[in-house]
Image (spheres, rainbow, N blue to C red):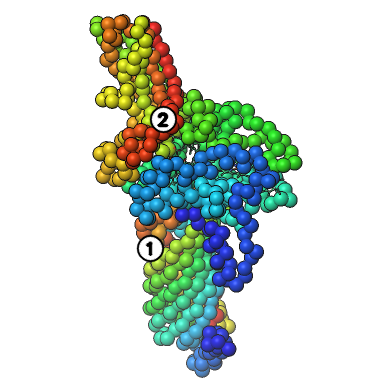
Amino acid sequence: MTPHRALLLALPAALSLLPSLARAQTRDGGWRQGHPLALGARASVRAGDYALVGLGGHLRVQPHRLVTLELFADHFVGTLNDALRHDHEVGGIVQLNVLRGDSWALYPLLGACATLAFVHSPQSGGPTVNDIHFGVRVGAGGQVSLGRGFGLQAQVEALGYLGHPFQVYRFTAQTAPDLALYGLGQLTTALNYSF
Amino acid sequence: MLEGSARGLWWLALGLGCAPAPPASRGNASCAGCHPTQARALASSRHSRATESDLFRALRARASTADRAFCDGCHTVHDVPGEEGAGCVTCHQAGGNRGVSNARLVLDLQGPVRGPFGSATSAHRSAPGDFLRSADLCGTCHEVQGPGAFVETPYSEWSASPAAQSGITCAGCHMARSPGDPEAPRERGPAAVGGPDRALTDHAFVGPEHQRAAELLGRSASLAMHVVPNGATLRVEVTMTNRNTAHALPSGARFARELWLEVRALTDQGTTVLAGAPEDPRRVELGDRVTRNGLPALPTASDPPEVRALPAAGSRTVTLELPASVGGSPVRALTAVLRFRRNDPRLRQALGLPPDPTGPLDLAAVTHAL
């Protein structure tokens, strides 16, 4: 077995241990504040300099009751001048659970992400371009417990990206040589399960 | 310069460990057996002779190594031994571009053959070619930006022209049965051996360097002349009009062209050139002055060419003060002629090239009797 494969197998094994670790902690009224690990499925819409809708997932780790780290991966789609645009995004945010109750929390957040964005010209067999855009995000969100370890989460973010502009029209697709800044707003809702 | 070359795809496929059968020959010969009409016409066109001219070779030799690769992006794009320029697959398997200039064509060599009919044939996969039928295909090579100030701009001129507004593309004139006339009925015949009759296009791409240049150039300009006797002189107003509604006259490689106005006087002694002789300091010219310093080099940003072309559908009137008599004989009639030579002799001389054997062509003429 290659070291690569071994690592891939070891990872789920390690993850499956974490829930039992988590269960060792006290439960408070179904809301598992103290539980260090949650997985979530999420849907997002973003609009501003361009508009896309996305689906993705995240892993939430809570090393301290005030702090949640969220690592996410999303896939966005949309159109750009009749061309198909799709973005693969990975990133992380830090949430500060400043306002908390037994079954809810509100937090400001700060994060960063990297997006591999593709644009396919509308012509079949036509050119495809891609570029990596780097982004920073600030925002606020909250979550409420639904019981049985499930939680509902919603957050709004302001996103700023740096990347090369896509120039797509009719039969042409290219990236412009100079970098540009993009501003967007994003709304994300997620269903989480904490172990 | 061309992306997605078969060789690139081949190596990529090898790298992924799923090698397809090597691509079939992309040469024109592989299409010619079934499409002899198009192949014969294309062989006569400049697209098949894009490195043939000694002027091209002389200018390319003077360019830097990087700029030579740039020249080759358009002039030797078709990397099939024995064939050069734009070949069948260059146009019929182009999927789009990365900008309408500088040969930024994107080929889709694994894809279907793009055609105007969208017909199904067992010979090969075909698909309707929106890009093929657009001016953007042509503009990808017929819009040159640099090096330096070395520019050719037929596509951008066309984009802003009346012809573009009425939907007349480059092929409408340059692939017409009667070159330059988009209204001319298309020739009918089989598009492939044994195929049904179709409305066909002419793959000769007649331009000023083609052996049929006169057919196209005869449609390119008109002249009008107004003469007012003024004592011992004649005040002559000549209006030159570009009849082409699609782009400037001249366009494209106008740094290479000599296009000038000649006024001849008819007297009892014979015909004399009164204006427009090569040494005439007030000679009216429409070709680019290659570089301002006159040296045989590609124009640079600091030494750009001087553009004197007539814009699409545009006119220019020049006023000349000419003698009313020649050698004592009164002028009986004046003839103005707009003349074209494909290579400017001054440029050839500066590059040390022998004179161009092809003589001048007359684009338009007008005579005024006195």
Mark 2 is surrounded, within 10 Å at the Cα level, by few (under 14), some (14 to 19) or many (20 or more) other residues, namely many
Q: Amino acid at mark 2?
A: Arg
For this rendering, which residue is in front, B349 or B37?
B349
Image point (50%, 30%), residue name:
B213
Q: Which residue is mark 2?
A: B341
In which chain is the residue bearing label 2?
Answer: B
The amino acid type of the residue labelled 1 equals Leu
Label 1 CA crowd tier, 10 Å (few <14, some 14–19, many 20+): some
In the image shown, does B339 or A19 lie closer to the viewer?
B339
- In the displayed structure, would residue B69 be above or below residue B208? below
Q: Residue at x 40, y 71 (%)?
A: A112
Above or below B77: residue B309: above
Q: Confirm whether residue B107 shows in the render.
A: yes
Toward the viewer: A148 or A42?
A: A42
Seen as rendered, the residue at the extreme front is: B354
Image position of B115 with respect to B267: above or below? below
Residue A95 picture location, percent across and down: 41, 77
SS type, badge 2: strand
Q: On the image, numbered disc 1 is attached to which residue?
A: A162
Rendered location of residue B93, percent (x, y): 59, 51
